[in-house]
Image (cartoon, grey):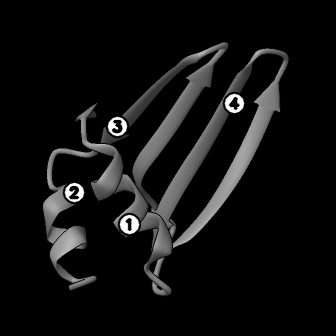
Amino acid sequence: MKLIMRSEFDALRLNPDHSYDADRNGDKQIVRIYCDDKLIAKKVTQKKHVRYFGVADYKQYLSATE
């Protein structure tokens, strides 16, 4: 997985063809986005730090949203 921009993550999350879930464990929260049960992106929030990650070919899923 590699870092992606927040706007790209939001576009993936808001796509009706994708599903997502969220987990929280103490100070750490993870939001995962799936397409056909394949993990394509995740958001990791730990305290005040937020990072967005996408699989190597996440742009293929991003272009499907536009």
Residue type at mark 3?
Phe
* Quadrant of the image containing the C terminus: bottom left
Q: Which mark is residue 53?
A: 3
Q: Earlier in the sequence, mark 2 or mark 1?
A: 1
Q: Spatial distance from mark 4 to mark 1, Cα to Cα?
A: 18 Å
Q: CA distance from mark 2 to mark 3?
A: 9 Å
Instruction: Give the mark nearer the N terminus: 3 vs 4.
Output: 4
Label whose residue precedes the other's in the sequence (2 or 3)? 3
Circle 4 residue: 29
* x then y, percent, for residue 56: 16, 45
Of pointers 4 and 1, the one earlier in the residue sequence: 1
If you read the primary sequence from the N terminus, does the residue marked by circle 3 or circle 1 appear first? Answer: 1
Q: Nearer the viewer, mark 2 or mark 1?
A: 1
| Disc 4 residue type (three-letter) | Gln
Q: Quadrant of residue 31?
A: top right
Q: Which amino acid lies under the numbered mark 1 shown in the image of this protein? A: Leu
- Please tell me which residue is depicted at 14% across the width and 69% down the height of the picture: 60
- The mark found on residue 58 in the picture is 2
Mark 4 surroundings: few (<14), some (14-19) or many (≥20) residues within 10 A: some
Q: Tell me where residue 40 appears, x and y as whole percent.
A: 37, 55
Residue 61 against residue 46 in the figure, above or below: below
Distance between the Cα atoms at labels 2 and 1?
9 Å
- In three-dimensional space, the C-alpha distance between marks 2 and 4, rounded to whole angstroms, equals 21 Å
